[in-house]
Amino acid sequence: MFDPFDINKDGKLDIAESFLKFETIMGNDEENLEDDLAIAGLDMFELEMMDEYERREAIEDAGLDPDDYDDLFI
């Protein structure tokens, strides 16, 4: 089977090719989460200024699961 991430066409993914595949497929999660917040009418800057309790409540009030966004505000 053809894998577009098999750059050297040897039939298997080496560590660099695997990393490229992972980053391409999974690397945009943080951007997607930020987009979800913006679509819900929440501003990243305002959320960053809130304490953890206020931020979780604002995200929950917007109909989103605050646990999904913990990694954005470390």
Image: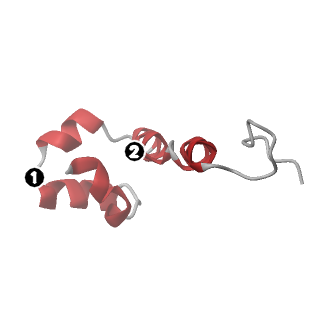
Q: Residue furthest front?
A: 10
- Which mark is drawn over residue 60? none
Q: Which of 26 and 3 lies nearest the eye of the viewer? A: 3
Quadrant, the N terminus: bottom right
Q: Secondary structure at mark 2?
A: helix
Residue drawn 39% across the image and 45% down it: 37
Q: Secondary structure at mark 1?
A: loop
> Residue 50, image x and y in percent?
13, 47
Amino acid carrying mark 1 in the image: Asp
Q: Is residue 52 left or right of residue 32?
A: left
Q: Which of 5 and 69 lies nearest the eye of the viewer? A: 5
Amino acid carrying mark 2 in the image: Leu
Q: Are marks 1 and 2 in contact (CB under 8 Å)?
A: no
Q: Which of 13 and 38 lies nearest the eye of the viewer? A: 13
Residue that badge 1 annotates: 51
Residue drawn 30% across the image and 36% down it: 43
Q: Earlier in the sequence, mark 1 or mark 2?
A: 2
Residue drawn 46% across the image and 46% down it: 36
Q: Residue furthest right?
A: 1
Residue that badge 2 annotates: 37
Packing grade of label 2 (10 A; few <14, some 14-19, many >=20) is some
> Residue 70, image x and y in percent?
28, 58
